[in-house]
Amino acid sequence: MDVFEVAYQRAVAYRSSVADQPVKPQLDYQQMRARFAGRLPETGTPDCDVINELADLGEVGLMPITHPRFFGWVMGASSPVSVAADWLASAWGQNAAMHSATPTAAAVEETAAGWLLEILDLPREAAVGFVTGATAGNFAALAAARGALLRRDGWNCEADGLFGAPQVHVFVSDDVHASVLSALRYLGFGERRVVRVDTDNQGRMLARDLARRCAACEGPKLIIAQAGQINTGSFDPFATLADIAQENGAWLHIDAAFGLWARAVPDLRTLTDGIERADSWVVDGHKWLQVPFDSGYAIVRDADALQRSMAISASYLPAREASDRAPSYLVPELSRRARGLPTWAALRSLGRSGVAAMVRQHCALARRIAADLAQVPGILVMNDVVLNQVILRFGHDGDGAERRKVLAAAVMDRVVADGIIFVAGATWRGEWVMRISVISGAIADEDVSIATSAIRAAWRQVSIEATSETAIR
């Protein structure tokens, strides 16, 4: 049997049965280390045997992210069509850096970029870099912002570095995502030097505080807002922030790893009003578009700014005409896989209406989860469910935050151990909460019923046990 056929059969067998399996790895990391540990082989093994061995050893340690009841983090379920396209990307073996050396990869990426700008309704002249995800996307877009802002002050940071450069003042939400801070660190801005702007109880940036802080700083300014706060799903007031950015000559960047997809849904679009006035945006494909990891998009209105910051050129690389879209001018890597293929396949398969229907359904299911569990005594929905995120507190006001943390952890441990759903926790406003992210392409109404029933049952049991412990004391 051909090795490709073996891989195909193992992949199909896994994906066709994943929804019937517990929503958790069967073995933990230490157990998997032991399974894969061993000395480097002195002699080779037949290819088909290698793939079967990999699957036999590895499947028991897989997190079933493609399961319809995986709610742990904001991760898509990699649709079959995009996985198939990703297989072709690997099988074709194209290095997507150069348009003339890999015409298909570059052309597909260019078309997919245009489709993304259209479905997200962003400036059609913007450049789109296909990156690994939001962290790399923020790095690329913020590098473009850094270069453009410093050039306005007569400094060429791409050529002369940052020693002696004017200080760029960076403003972030007090509830900024960690990937933004990482990108700023990579770019030399540092985490502690940023100006943190106050937020409301949903994590939305307060425009009046931003305006006040901008007024107190002289020099180039970079404002970073977000669409889809990672815990609450909330959106910053983009129109007002854009006004402030314009008044201050600032670059406005939007970290929108999953929230930007709201623009594809007419009845959710108002959440993003004004976002099109920004200078750059970042969004993931491996979230709501359901393409395989790793897939993200750095979108920059000023294409020249992105190209100046990312361009890789050398005499041995193919020459580029000004009208050519050279992928290596838009992302940090020179050598990379043809990431545009799965994106093209996903958009071709779903179409505009399919993307909108999927996002709309997930948001409706999130609201249903919140409405159901809000009726349960001792469970508090801590966010306005405007998108696909639900965060739950367990326990009553009189229990105290530490006690509620213990209760929430116990509920999460129980539902994960049962394997019916997978959820994860986070700290929000001093409370340890259960985060439910509804973003699996395969989720259906019955999965929501199963999920809420599992959480209700776990909370009921934890409450009984907690009451018994209190009585004993």
Image (spheres, rainbow, N blue to C red):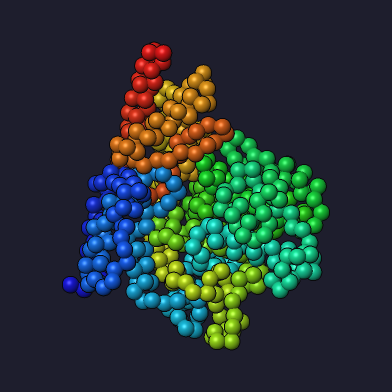
Residue 394 horizontal/vertical position (percent): 45, 28
Residue nearer the viewer, 251 or 94: 94
Residue nearer the viewer, 450 or 48: 48
Q: What residue lies at 44% left-to-right and 30% top-to-bottom?
A: 408
Residue nearer the viewer, 278 or 190: 190
**For residue 445, what is the image quadrant?**
top left
367 is higher (above) or lower (below) than 222: above
Please give the count of numbered marks on the rendered protein. 0
The N terminus - image quarter? bottom left
The C terminus - image quarter? top left
Query: From this viewpoint, is residue 452 visible?
Result: no
Residue 327 horizontal/vertical position (percent): 53, 74
Q: What residue lies at 59% left-to-right and 80% top-to-bottom?
A: 313
Q: What residue lies at 67% left-to-right and 54% top-to-bottom?
A: 190
Query: From this viewpoint, is residue 311 visible?
Result: yes
Residue 472 horizontal/vertical position (percent): 38, 13
45 is higher (above) or lower (below) than 463: below
**For residue 366, what is the image quadrant?**
top left
Q: What residue lies at 52% left-to-right and 22% top-to-bottom?
A: 400
Residue 149 horizontal/vertical position (percent): 73, 63
